[in-house]
Amino acid sequence: MSHLQSLTDLLSLAQLSPDALEKVLEHDRWKTEAILEHEFKIEELRQQYLHGSMSSESGSYSQDDLSFNLVSSYSECNESQVFKVAKTKVKLGILKLCEEKYPIIEGFLLQDQRYSKIPLKDREVGVMKPLANAMIYMSCCSERLKRWPIAKDKSSILHIQKDLETKALKIESLTFLVVYDAVFSSWKYLFEGELEFNDTDIKPILEKVSLRVSLKEEVEKRSDIKTSPLFKSILGVFPYIDLIRLEQYYYSLSERFVDAAIKTLTLHFTQNRPAELDSTDQYAEWSDIYISYLPEYKVKWKNQLKELELDNWNEQIAWHKALTSLPTMSP
């Protein structure tokens, strides 16, 4: 009930004449108007405190706020979402943006030299596109919160970040890094320079992912059998041996080093005449005569390789044991 209505009821109980009642009400009208104006001003000041950018004269939103509200949601948010993170509306807008502009992101993905190292399962559009979408969504919401730090729905940022972190755990860490870099590189084309890229809430996830990639690379580097003492030492005896092929044979033959090395050396022997045989049957094609020399060389290689394996046995065992102390990182 308004102040003016309350006063009317009170004066009616006093049984004043209509003329007298009208004079009293007219006299009290200033007070009623002053109360209403005061209450309106209090509400206006409260809104200004909550939102920060409201015009004190008109109570309307600034043009900058309205423009930002549209750009950061890809035109999905209306005036009622100003001063809010508005995650649902922003999510709808970013889904639309990705449908229209994902080829831009994909172009940067394919240009990345690391793309070929990403597992095939992660290269699917159904994996990369939702991940890119989640990063853009996170960035837009982070930028909205940066502009309106006391948005009443600011806690929603934590839920968006958690969702992105969950996606990161379901894929290879390298995939996350490559998609992040593609989103960053394509940002100015996605929003045509009208919105800043904000990775404030992506960085904590990015740091963990980057560490996982570094640890994995370190593990792979240190556990590469080609860097082991035994594989290094074979180069001193057979400098021409193909270590990559030796590695393939080594694992396919259940890590039997001597057998793998003989198979590798045999392949090389069939294609390359040893220097000491250059003057032997020099008019014959090597592919036609190598078979007659191969048994002798295999015996020679076997003795050399067994001695090599024995000489490096302790160091090779120590190298394998050291692999168990390599750093790991839990999710």
Image: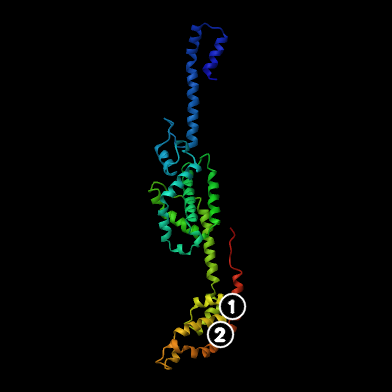
Tell me where residue 85 appears, x and y as whole percent.
49, 42
Tell me where residue 11 appears, x and y as whole percent.
55, 11
Tell me where residue 306 appears, x and y as whole percent.
58, 85
Q: Is residue 88 above or below residue 203?
A: above
* Count of all numbered marks drawn on residues in the image: 2
The answer, for residue 218, to whether it is visible in the render is yes
Q: Tell me what residue is drawn at x 54 percent, y 61 percent.
A: 212
The answer, for residue 85, to whether it is visible in the render is no
Q: Amino acid at mark 1?
A: Gln
Q: Tell me what residue is drawn at x 43 percent, y 44 percent.
A: 74
Q: Along the polypeptide, which appears first: circle 1 or circle 2? A: 2
Badge 2 density bin: few <14, some 14–19, many ≥20, Cα 10 Å: many
In 3D space, how far apart are the residues under numbered discs 1 and 2 (Cα atoms)?
A: 14 Å
Q: Is residue 198 above or below residue 229?
A: above
Q: Is residue 252 above or below residue 166?
A: below
Badge 1 density bin: few <14, some 14–19, many ≥20, Cα 10 Å: some
Return the residue found at the far bottom: 280
Which corner quadrant of the image does residue 70 belong to?
top left
Circle 2 residue: 305
Q: Amino acid at mark 2?
A: Leu
Tell me where residue 272 appears, x and y as whole percent.
44, 85
Rendered image: mark on residue 316: 1
Quadrant containing the N terminus is top right
Front position in the image: 93 or 192: 93
Q: Secondary structure at mark 2?
A: helix
